[in-house]
Every structure is written in C-alpha cells, then in structure tokens.
Image (cartoon, rainbow, N blue to C red):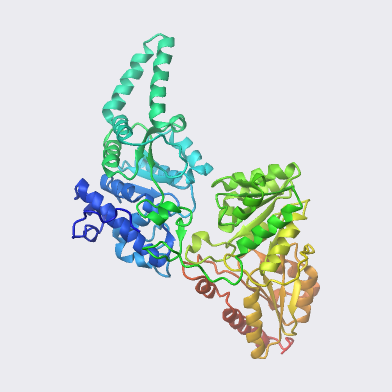
Amino acid sequence: MLKNSQTNLDNKSILNRITYPADIRELDIESLIQLSNEVRKELIESVSQTGGHLGAGLGVVELTIALHYVFNTPYDRLIWDVGHQSYPHKILTGRHKQMKTLRKEGGLSGFTKRSESEYDPFGAAHAGTSISSALGMAVAADLNHEDRRVVAVIGDGAMTAGMAYEAMNNAGSMDLPLVVVLNDNDMSIAPPVGAMSAYLSKLISSSSYRSLRAVAGQVAKRFPKSLAKTAKKAEEYARGIVTGGTLFEELGFYYIGPIDGHNIKHLIPVLKNIKDKPHDGPVLVHVVTHKGHGYLPAEESSDKFHGVSKFNVVTGAQPKNKKSMPSYSSVFANTLSKIATNDKKIVAITAAMPSGTGLNLFAKKFPDRFFDVGIAEQHAVTFAAGLAAEGMKPFVAIYSTFLQRAYDQIIHDVSIQQLPVRFAIDRAGLVGADGPTHAGSFDITYLANIPKMIVMAAADGEELKRMCLTAANINNRPSAFRYPRGESTGFKNNRNLTPLTIGKGRLISKGNTIAILSFGARLQECIKAAELLEKRGLSTSVADARFCKPLDKGLIKNLYTKHSLLVSVEEGVIGGFASHVSKYISDNQELGDLSRFLSILFPDKFIEQRSPDAMYRSAGLDAQSIADRVQKFFNIKYQKSSNLKA
C-alpha cells in the first residue's frame, strides 16, 4: 500500500501544473511536500506498468524536488550517477506524460540520456561516472567564465567505484564550485539524523560559519603550536561527532551532513546556503535516504524492488514468470557450487551483483569462498589475479558490459602473467529494455584478441555446465565463457558432467551446400535458419564452434572445403569470432580465397531498447534474417561462378 502518500492533500493536483522545474520554484514549502507525495504516487503507478528501477527513485523524491527548486536547472547542471534514481527527475523535467513509455521501444530510457532532454546533461548507466563528468563540466564553466553550478548525485553503492575517488582526489585540489550529493541509503555510515543534525548542517553550510572558521584558523596560527594544534583538533573532533566527514575532508571536500533526505524543510536551506555562498572549493552534502521510501512493499523488501517487472500497486506482488527452465545465471551458479564441493580451491568473485550473477546461491554454500567487492570491476580482476598467483581457482562473474571497465587489468595483471583466472561473462548479447548501455556486444572481440586467452560461448544450458567445468580444469592460462540473459535451454538427462576438449567444436546437422557455424547462443536460430534454407532447396549443415580461441581449425577446414558457402554467426561486433575464422582461411591458401565466406554479426551501431526478440531482428540475427541473408549471398555467388555447388 502507499504509505502516507495522499494524507490531507488538496483535491487539485500540483503535479499536473508542473511541466518544468521553473514551475516548482513558484511553490511554497507545503506545496512542495504535497508535490513529493504526488510524484511518488505517479512513479509507483508508472513503473507498475512498465517495470524498471523503483526503490532508488522512491528514495530520492524529496531530494530531486529540492535540487530543482534551489538550482537553476538546466543552466545549472544536475548529474545523476547510474540513472537508477532518475525517474522522479524525468517526471519533473517535461517527461511526465511519457512515463508509461519507460524502457519501451521508442520510449523513455531507463537511464539519463543526453538526446532525450536538455535536463540530462550527461548520460549514464554504469556507476561511478558522475563526479568525473561533473568536474569536467565545472572546469568548462570556469574556462568559459560561466557562473553555473554543477551538482553530482551519487549513491553510497556507486561510491564503492574507484573512479569516484579518483575524481574526488582531482576535484579536491581545485577551487571550483562543484557540489557532490552523497545519497546514503544503505551503508549506515551516518550517525542519527534529526532536527539537531539539520540545524548544525544548515549552520556549517552558511557563509557566516565559514567566515568564522577562516578567522578562527588565522587566529589559531598566532597561538603557540601546542595550543593551535589543540584548537584544530577540537574543531575536527566536534565536526567529526556531527558529520563523520573526515574521509571527504581529507580528499579536499567541505563536508556537510548528514541531512534527512526525506525532509524538504531541512534540505532546502542547506542547498540554498551552498548555492548562494562564495565558493572556495568542492562541497560534499551527505544525505540519508531510504530505498523504497513511502511505499511499504518496497521499504520492506528493497532488494526485490530495486529492479522490478510489472507489479500490483496495492499488494506489491510481481507476477512470477512461468519458467520451464532455469536461468543461465542459476545454471552457472549451481554448477560452480557443485564443482566447488569437491574442489576447495575454487572461489567466486563478483562486483556488486551477487543476485544478478546467481552467486548468492554459491555464497550460501561457501560463504568463506565468496567475495563481493562492490562496484569495483578493476579491483575484482586484479584481486582474482592475486588469488590465482597463490594457487587458488578464482571465478570472476561479471556482466559483459561491466567487464569492459577492467580491460587493462585483464591484459596486464592476468594475461601477461598467464594466471588462470576464469571469467564467467553473464548477459552476453542483447538484453532488451536496458538498451545499448547494458548490451554484451564487445567481449568476444576484446577477449579473443588477447594472446593465449581461451574464449568459449555456451549455446545452451548443458554447454554452459560443461564450460564451467572446463574452465575449472584450466590451470595454466586465463579463460572465459559467455552466456546470455534469460531462460536456458538444451539440457540432457545424463548425470555425468564432462569437460570439453579445448578448441573442439561439434557438428549438429549435416548438409552439402551451406555450412552455418554458430558461436554462442544463436545456435537454435541457426538450426531454424537451416530448416528454412532446406525448404528452399539449399542443403545446410549446422555446427557449434564452442571456442573462438583456440579455433577448431579442423572443423572449419572441413566445413569450408565441403560446402559452397561457410557462414559464421555470432552475438558480437566486428573483430570477433568471424575475424579469427577469416584470418585462418586467408592464411591457408589451399582453402581458397574468402569469397565463399559470409559473416553475420552485430551491425556497426548501438541497438536501442526494445524486446530482446525485436533487438535480434533489428540486428539481423533471428532465423528468418539469417536465412534471407544466406540465400541472397549464395544466389549472387552462384550467378557469378559455375563452380559453386547447386
């Protein structure tokens, strides 16, 4: 149920009178409180129909209103880290009527997006980028002599990203009016908040306090060193009791807080002081909020309401998908848990995604061998390298799109040293409503280019189980296996799990004219495409490569020499599996030239949000598109050469 959302509200909606933030600035404080209730209600109703990230947005409703009330957006820049919490911001910045299109094809993005609104000065869907981008904008404003404020809002979870501290370290040395709002909703790093804390935060954010502090500092310099040191320590101790801001102060930020993030009457005076006072460096405002605030089901189960499917507003119930098969993530986690039962050297690592990767299942069985390092992919990889160097068997489970952030560590810390770190790459391929920021498009290319890296792709759930076991048995170099989001397929009833032979694929069906060589989870679509081609009179073989590196050269040679056309299919961009196949063919002149080779992969563009099936159709990787592309290519080649088999 909604908690206190419509109590004592006027009959007339304030939200319906708000088009842009300028309208908010015409309201009094009591009206802002009513507006927050209406925004929260609208957010719940919208996301209940579209799905999306709910809990984080509910937690920042009052903060969003206060920021837009105090700062002159869009001239003043407001940047939301990740974008999970940006839905109230969207409602208040000209997109209220479009909220029912959230995450749908042609609709609003689930994250901030520059092309969507001038109120989104920086697009983001990966954590930890807000402070860096905000600092860049603050420097640009300074160089352009523009009197604009730049505000970055970052959650405590995103503050585990090393990039955030790199940015703060840089910003702390600059005399720029940068404001960082730390939205603390989970870490419990704050002492109790309330009226006294709000009063003190307002006091220390004021110019009079800062002036007094500066004067006190000058006076203290004239004291004997012992007394000056005592005075400084006294101030630091007093402020430490109130704020706990020592870390941020050491990084060069003036710390204010903690402030109750759900109390507009507390937020606005502090933000006004920050905006209006003379600036002599960056400021960090520590705001304490609660995920799911104001909606009881989300408050009681913040993990389940972080990202939701459609749900019942009254009860909060989310319909359970009727899955006949387990997800790929759970197949991986359960298989790893089974293997780890008999191998105590196996450890599992993830970067703030224990549930998303399924490793919460592993953690229940082996809590001492499970490590969630936070949003710190770079650290996760080098941490795994250290474990491997000491004889452990680390499995690093990270989404494809997030593993991109640790590419240098994969090369420098793992691969050059030939350390047997195993990369379990979840969400490989296109992922639907999260759009291009979360698509696993690049991992085949960026991993298979690394010397001696073993790169596998699972065609189904059974293959994923075998690849997990295969990786566990590779002890002399790094390896990776990729698998998609969603429900798995292709299980067999055999109980004996056996590893794969490194670098060996498999022939699925045999024809004599066309050969389709699939790498990864498009295998079933390739099989369907072969059936379509058979009906058109083109006898078609289908094979599963299993490995991009090392290639099954014998399989490729057999397919290329015994068929009129070899077609590779992969869920990746140029430079991946097809590039390795074509390199092998071109290097072996006895196989002929590349005129009989066709590669089908992702087009050279970012594929926008829509259903996964629609995304694959757009990419030309569904069965019909594959068959049509193959037939068109074959017909052109057949007309040009009588040597091709009919």
Q: Which quadrant would residue 311 be assigned to in this image?
A: bottom left
| Quadrant housing the N terminus | bottom left
Give above or below for 305 relative to 530: above
Viewed as shown, does residue 273 lie left or right of 620? left
Residue 207 place in picture, x, y as percent: 27, 29
Left or right of 59 in this view: 574: right
Q: Name which quarter of the figure residue 9 lies in.
A: bottom left
Visible residue check, residue 122: no
Q: Position of residue 412 (x, y in %)?
A: 67, 46
Estimate the x, y position of residue 383 in percent, counting from the top left: 65, 43
Residue at 50 percent across and 59 percent down: it is: 437
Question: Measured along the vertical axis of the image, is residue 264 above or below residue 342?
Answer: above
Image: 592 above or below 212: below
Residue closest to the eye, 522 or 580? 522
Q: Quadrant of the C terminus?
A: bottom right
Looking at the picture, how far across and down is residue 261, in whole percent? 34, 43
Q: Quadrant of residue 387?
A: top right
Q: Residue at x 61, y 82 (%)?
A: 627
Query: Which residue is rendered at x = 70% and y = 68% of the image?
Result: 462
**Residue 567 seen in the current view:** yes
Front one among 605 and 214: 214
User: How many numbered circles does the render carry?
Assistant: 0
Q: Is residue 280 above or below residue 476?
A: above
The reply, left or right, for residue 94 in relation to residue 325 is left
Q: Residue furthest top?
A: 224
Q: Residue at x 54, y 47 (%)?
A: 375
